[in-house]
Amino acid sequence: MDTTSDGDTSASYREKAKEKERVSRTSLIHWHSHHNDAAAVRKLLEEDPSLVHARDYDNRTPLHVASLHGWADVASCLIEFGADVNAQDRWRNTPLADAEGAKRNSVIELLKLRGGLSYGQNGSHLEHRPVPPPLPNRCDWEVDPTELDFSNSICIGKGSFGEILRAHWRGTPVAVKRILPALSDDRLVIQDFRHEVNLLVKLRHPNVVQFLGAVTDRKPLMLITEYLRGGDLHRYLKVKSSLSTSTAINFAMDIARGMAYLHSEPNVIIHRDLKPRNVLLVNSCADYLKVGDFGLSKLIKVKSSHDVYKMTGETGSYRYMAPEVFKHRRYDKKVDVFSFAMILYEMLEGEPPFTNLEPYEGAKHVAEGHRPIIRAKGYGPELRELIELCWAGDMTQRPSFLDILKRLEKIKEKPSEHHWHLFSS
């Protein structure tokens, strides 16, 4: 018996277990720092003081996160445990530079008292000019805000940066994302707004929400898209619960078509927040769907079809998040394929994945290798196999959206005994 081999295997297993726990705790301290939970941060640091130096894949420390959001209590706790006030992230920003960029005065004062210096792209020493408008050149899509009629507007969505309203533009119903006036000078908000406008201007596809224009040279900043009367898929599923196999497949094909377009090389757009709330129905009859909300999307130029990128960890919604994102590992466009699998599961099963767990715990459960249990009996093995491929732990095993479309076409063209009658229309 080869005891040396057994010993090596056991040691390897222990190392992997320790690494898994380490990744989880690194994610936790960044998450608690982001959510202003000083007590939870302190508890983690008391158990493992080295976590004060934890880095995510943008090389940010917990102090960077707390400084950016202005959480003075969390920042004080981190400094108490020995956080480096002049640590630099991948952009060479220090925590003080992030705090200055976001105008977090209480944290700015705290960091300066502790010897903090302002270095990096956000540092005040680098930019003495006022923040420029998001898109300085007036374009043919620039909308005069006086043309927007909010007299009978309805709020159809809210976020931390503003709200989405149904309004009218030149007599046509439109959806207007309106940035809160108080945030219209915030450098980070303007950066995100510019990014989303720049993405939407380039998109033209039947299964992608259509950009119509933007207000970029006056406050409040506004982004105007077509208004889709059917609402979002999240609301639709709450009413309908599980969908018939035929409807679920038709919906899945609409989503896959939009995503295949977004993933087209060389200018790949990774959505990074694909979920039912960001999939919209064109009308109350749900004739077809469109993918929308590109606030977290990332535009990248692909040099090789196998390129993998370092991007911000924990971007998007936990319930539909790919494990490599949660673990702050390198990832690529296949993160959207994982989210697609979770949406397809929800459409067929009638409930979100791991609905018994809080979103963060659900994402952690997924990162540990667990997947939702497929219970519905009304669809065949081909569809089950596709879902399992799409949520594979190894992102290289997940199919592209073009491959997904081909598989769904075959399932639709070759009905099985489970659903042969569903595609007769």
Image (tube, rainbow, N blue to C red):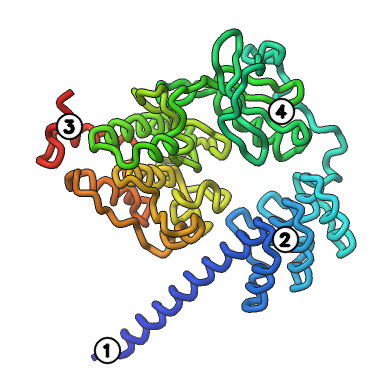
Q: Earlier in the sequence, mark 4 or mark 3?
A: 4
Q: Which amino acid type is marked by label 2?
A: Leu
How many residues crowd around disc 1 within 10 Å: few (fewer than 14), some, or many (20 or more)?
few
State the residue at coordinates (51%, 35%). 301
Q: CA distance from mark 2 to mark 1?
A: 48 Å
Residue 182 picture quarter: top right
Disc 4 marks which residue?
134
| Mark toward the viewer: 1 or 3 | 3
Q: Earlier in the sequence, mark 2 or mark 1?
A: 1
| Mark toward the viewer: 2 or 3 | 3
3 lies above or below 197: below
Q: Position of residue 201 (x, y in %)?
A: 56, 22
Residues marked 2 and 1 touching at CB (< 8 Å): no
How many residues crowd around disc 4 within 10 Å: few (fewer than 14), some, or many (20 or more)?
many
Disc 1 marks which residue?
2
Q: Earlier in the sequence, mark 1 or mark 3?
A: 1
Disc 3 marks which residue?
422
